[in-house]
Image: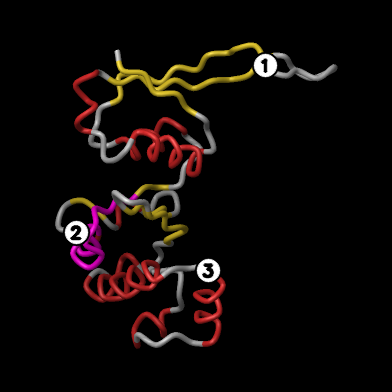
């Protein structure tokens, strides 16, 4: 499995010069190292995950999101696969594994899960500060949830909105109706 550190470092628990440099520079975190160690152990039990690539780890106060390459999610979850459960035991935080996708609906659904989204609407609004020669409309994405779903949100609404911007590159507005 491709992780933030090399396989040798994940197996031995000691970091080589390159991986130590990544850690010191802040490119990776201690969480990335722990995830890599769990990934190596998981790969020993499930050899078919050898081609899975963990692209990024995003940690917030409520949970950890692990972004994997498109098509890799099926190798990590479902059936007897329990990669996220193993990570939750080690990291002592809920873990969400999401596939990197250009489909903003998939990204938003994954981040807001287990809350159910009623709809995602795209509205075109006049630009705030149009410059001469530029398009004078902007796209706004509105995520609609039932008021009952407010208690099922996996974290603070502000944090979820920031995660959507970070992962999907989309500014959203959330409405409960």
- Which numbered disc, 2 or 3, marks the residue that appears first in the sequence? 3
| Chain-order first, disc 1 or disc 2 | 2
Residue at 24 percent across and 53 percent down: it is: 94
Crowd tier of the residue under label 1, counting other residues whose Cα lies within 10 Å: few below 14, some 14–19, many 20 or above: few
Describe the element under mark 1 as helix, strand or loop. loop
Q: From the image, tell me which residue sits under label 1.
A: 127
Part of the protein shown in magenta: 84-97
Does 156 sit above or below residue 36? Answer: above
Between disc 1 and disc 3, whose residue precedes? 3
Verify CB contact (< 8 Å) between mark 1 and mark 3: no
Q: Position of residue 69 (x, y in %)?
A: 45, 54
User: Crowding near pointer 3: few (<14 within 10 Å), some, many (20+)?
Assistant: few
The answer to whether residue 57 is left or right of residue 44 is: right
Q: CA distance from mark 1 to mark 3?
A: 37 Å
Residue where numbered disc 2 is placed? 85
Query: In the depicted view, which residue is nearer to us: 71 or 22?
Result: 22
Q: Residue at x 50, y 43 (%)?
A: 166
Q: Is residue 79 part of the magenta span, yes or no? A: no
* Residue holding disc 3: 26
Whole-number angstrom distance, CA of label 1 to CA of label 2: 45 Å
Which residue in the rendered view is the most extreme toward the left?
A: 80
Q: Quadrant of residue 7?
A: bottom left
Q: Where is 16 relative to 5, above or below?
A: below
Q: Marks 2 and 3, how far apart in space?
A: 26 Å
Q: Do labels 2 and 3 touch, CB within 8 Å?
A: no
Quadrant in which the C terminus appears = top left
Asked if 45 appears above or below 102 in the picture, the reply is below
The number of callouts visible is: 3
């Amino acid at each position: 499995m491709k992780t933030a550190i090399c396989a040798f470092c994940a197996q031995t628990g000691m970091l080589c010069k390159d991986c130590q440099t990544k850690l010191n520079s802040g490119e990776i975190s201690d969480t990335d190292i722990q995830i890599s160690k769990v990934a190596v152990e998981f790969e020993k039990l499930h050899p078919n995950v050898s081609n899975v690539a963990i692209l990024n780890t995003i940690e917030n106060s409520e949970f950890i999101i692990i972004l994997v390459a498109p098509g890799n999610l099926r190798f990590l979850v479902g059936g007897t696969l329990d990669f996220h459960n193993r990570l939750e035991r080690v990291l002592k935080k809920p873990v969400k594994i999401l596939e990197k996708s250009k489909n903003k609906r998939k990204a938003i659904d994954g981040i807001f899960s287990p809350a159910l989204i009623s709809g995602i609407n795209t509205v075109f609004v006049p630009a705030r500060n149009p410059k001469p020669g530029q398009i004078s409309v902007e796209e706004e994405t509105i995520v609609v949830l039932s008021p009952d779903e407010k208690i099922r949100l996996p974290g603070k609404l502000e944090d979820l909105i920031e995660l959507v911007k970070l992962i999907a590159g989309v500014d959203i507005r959330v409405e409960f109706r």
